[in-house]
Image (cartoon, rainbow, N blue to C red):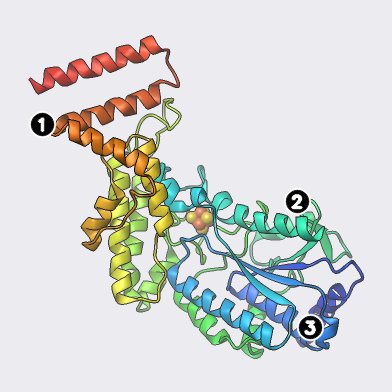
Amino acid sequence: MQDQIKSIIAEIQAQYFEDDNNRPWIVGFSGGKDSTMLLQLVWYALIEYPAELRKRKIYVVCNNTLVENPKILAYTEKVLDKIQKAAVKKSMPITVHRTTPRLEDTFWVNLIGKGYPAPNNIFRWCTERMKINPTTKFILETISEEGEVIILLGTRSDESSKRASSIKKYGIEGQRLRKHVLPNAFVFAPIKDVLTKEVWQYLLQMPSPWGASNRELVTLYNNASGGDCPLVVDITTPSCGNSRFGCWVCTVVNKDKSMEALIDNGEEWMEPLSMLRDTLAMSRDSEKYRERRRRDGTEKEGTLGPYKAFFRAEVLETLLRAQKAIQDEQPEISPLITYQELVAIQVIWYRDNLFLNNVSEIYQKVYGRTINLDSVSEGIASEKRLLREVCKENPDDFNEINKLLEIQKTKTILMNNRGLHNVLENHLENYIKNSK
Ligand code: SF4
């Protein structure tokens, strides 16, 4: 083991001091065991040299999907702060960068806002939006500033057979770097041949150079009983799936063993999250919760459309209730949904003519206080107020007009005006008949 570590450190040093115009390094850091070992090795490899020789920039990049397991996220955030502070103190050329999905790509904006079903293996819409895209954006921006980059990954051959074959496929015998799918980007995977037990051995023997506790990491793994969810930089990095540290909402796995194990080990405050995840898993293939028509207005035998409006509202309420309970008990835990996401959801609901759903009202119901979202979407909100006003005498008309607006939205794509006219007329006739 000692010799192996020495040889990895020598490789890292050789690559760092290679004369290649100081192409910056981007180290993918997830807070898990592999990326912790990788960054520790990089640190120990470079600290041996005087600060003036450490000229190559090292960007430590950590992606937050905004639906990370809150326990793991709190730990990772703590470690990232320590890394940044220690880097400044020791004059290491390391800076910490956090990436997050774009607002329109977050889990809640898509699921609650647009009604995307909870992801599964067939429709896994989340990985690209929440993991690959934010990191890719960071890499591309760095390439455009610096010309080329080298991405350091903590991928290992024995982590999974799929990853082993990916490393084999893209690695070139005798060369440290392999080409990344992005132009002007190369990949360096210094710990690819290290076995899992050797990772643990190393982490328990070598203290964290930035003053974190590797024992805490071990405990987290023991309590969570999961594997890693490393930084995902391309589709050849299988990160999501089986039991792992990942998004707490993940329905791609049948059971979130990590979260269940954490709850069993005393983190009972996570129970509402586990229940919400189970609700999402249960709802994904049910006609009770999903429209027959897809968002583009088409219908196809055997497939379902987005979640129905009532269910999206229910999920938001359950999520806010979970958030409130957690904030009361664990104030240091980050919110489960951001203000910006709430605004985006409201805007999408209005745009989709789902006037029956109102984020502010749901928020008020849960928190007993208002949240001002209307100022952001005032134009749309005023339409709704007007509609309510004119339907004051007969509130059922308000619901009915909403249904007509929904029909119009979905049918205009498919039909000519005459066809749309007929559908609206039939719908109105039925409504009038039933109200008599
Ligand atoms: S962990 Fe699950 S929810 Fe998160 S990106 Fe991967 S597949 Fe999607």
- Amino acid type for the residue under numbered disc 1: Glu
Seen at 29% across and 56% down, the residue is: 318
Seen at 43% across and 33% down, the residue is: 295
Q: Nearer the viewer, residue 345 or 286?
A: 345
**Where in the figure is residue 315, as x and y percent of width and height?**
31, 51
Left or right of residue 61, residue 43 in this image: right
Q: On the image, numbered disc 1 is attached to which residue? A: 393
Q: Is any atom of residue 103 visible in this view?
A: yes
Badge count: 3
**Where in the figure is residue 312, as x and y percent of width and height?**
32, 46
Label whose residue precedes the other's in the sequence (2 or 1): 2
10 Å crowding of disc 3: few (<14), some (14-19), many (20+): many
Q: CA distance from mark 1 to mark 3?
A: 75 Å
Q: Nearer the viewer, residue 327 or 8?
A: 327
Quadrant, the N terminus: bottom right
Q: On the image, numbered disc 2 is attached to which residue? A: 181
Q: CA distance from mark 2 to mark 3?
A: 28 Å
Q: Nearer the viewer, residue 50 or 287?
A: 50
Seen at 83% across and 66% down, the residue is: 23
Q: On the image, numbered disc 3 is attached to which residue? A: 46
Q: Quadrant of residue 143?
A: bottom right
Q: CA distance from mark 2 to mark 1?
A: 62 Å
Q: The residue tagged with tag 2: helix, strand or loop? A: loop
Q: Given the current orientation, which residue lies at the most extreme top position?
A: 418
Q: Given the current orientation, which residue lies at the most extreme left position?
A: 436
Left or right of residue 163, residue 30 in this image: left
